Image (cartoon, rainbow, N blue to C red):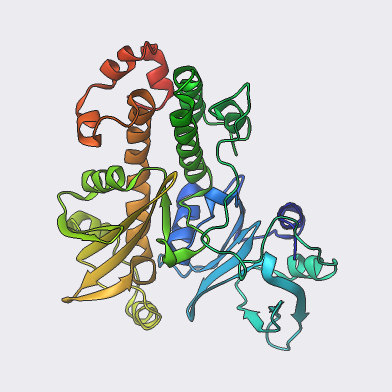
Amino acid sequence: MFRPSLIRRLARAHLAGGGVHHARDVNPDLRDQAIASMGQGCDHTAGEQLVAVLDDRIHHGPFLGALVTDRRYAWRNMQGQGSVAWADVERIDVLDSLLVEQQHCELVDGTRLRIPPTGVDLTPFFRALAALPTQPLSGQPSTRQRSPSTPPMELAPVSADDPTGARAASAAMYSPDPRHLTLYEWVWHLYSRDGASIFGRDLTARVTLLHRTAAHGRGGPALGDAGGRWLSPLGARDLFHAISIVLGPPQPTGEKGEILQADFDIPESWRRSAALDLDPLQRQALSTAGFGHDIRRIRFAIRDAAPGSTFSVLGHGGGRELGGLELQNPKLLWLIHRALLVVEHQVMVRRVLAGFDTSVGELLAQPIEHLAGQCHVDPAEVLGAGVA
């Protein structure tokens, strides 16, 4: 097993060259396209952090390459997707070949998982890992041992002096962002009083998820599709409304147990934006690999998962369900993720100011200046929170 801090240090030292984009300076659009194409993002509830994006894509097609986080290595190539958690790795062997140098990991159960090579030279990074003794990870269970009941890292670390956890969370931000810093300050001032701190702690956790999504891309729970593939800081009902703002009126399919489902038609402009700019041979190759289906409708499946919610997005085309959108048209998924984050931010600003007693529709209908005035918040601070 390799500690997260060790992965971050070795990646900075040994991953370099064309196609390598470290998290601190990666273009957000490239990062988010990679996450959509992998079908998995960092588990923001557990503090997983992106380390690097390895870009190996073809022309203007969907992202091909790999993601390195401090918890796992994930890739997508013409043969499909895959990932391996560092917590499951007992050792790494780097094998030489006359044609190509390939890396593979041997997991704790003895299964050998070959990591497909990319156009990026991974050899120095994997050799550096292979040269080190592995260590038990105290308090970090193997992904094969983790269960849905395993508590995540504290998103709102409270104390007697910080009953909402907002001050501690703001000090632990991944990168400076005045919008989120303003939200933490509002939580501190509005919810630190007796009886309100429980709501403040919930809001702190949601702001933390919002911040991590903006800083390291759309997140995903460790257990993947068992609880939804993607993370949102909004509750299920709020997220449903946010999606409706992004994609237009839904066609509800009803609730299925704890899951809220709805279908949305894809606007023609979105379908054109998500079309692949490829020549015929490239289009045929990518179609064989599962890319490029003509998606005309998508289904969201949303579930509350404190402090926010999880969701999956399925594509529909040709009168049938085509499976996860990350497999069929990751560029379209990236466009949805990007637009959704803007609305999530607007909803979170209003939730911090107004709490949870008002429906999201009513909240968004009220001028932000009115909500700020009710809380005695300086209008200039509203601009600082990223609301025009």
Asked if residue 211 is positioned above or below residue 357 in the image, the reply reads below
Q: Quadrant of the N terminus?
A: bottom right
Q: Position of residue 294 (x, y in %)?
A: 24, 71
Q: Residue at x 25, y 35 (%)?
A: 360
* Residue 305, above or below 61: above
**In the image as oriented, which residue stretches furthest toward the bottom?**
98
User: Does residue 6 appear to the left or right of 17 in the view shown?
Assistant: right
Task: From this view, report whether residue 64 is shown above or below residue 345.
Answer: below
Q: Nearer the viewer, residue 279 or 136?
A: 136
Q: Residue at x 44, y 67 (%)?
A: 59
Task: Report x, y in % for residue 39.
Answer: 45, 65
Q: Is residue 90 left or right of residue 25?
A: right
**In this orientation, does residue 328 appear?**
yes
Total marks placed: 0
Image x and y of residue 305, in percent: 41, 51
Residue 193 horizontal side relative to residue 247, left or right? right
Residue name at image x 75 percent, y 62 percent:
2
Q: Quadrant of residue 93?
A: bottom right
| Quarter of the view holding residue 18 | bottom right
Does 93 sit left or right of 336 as displayed? right
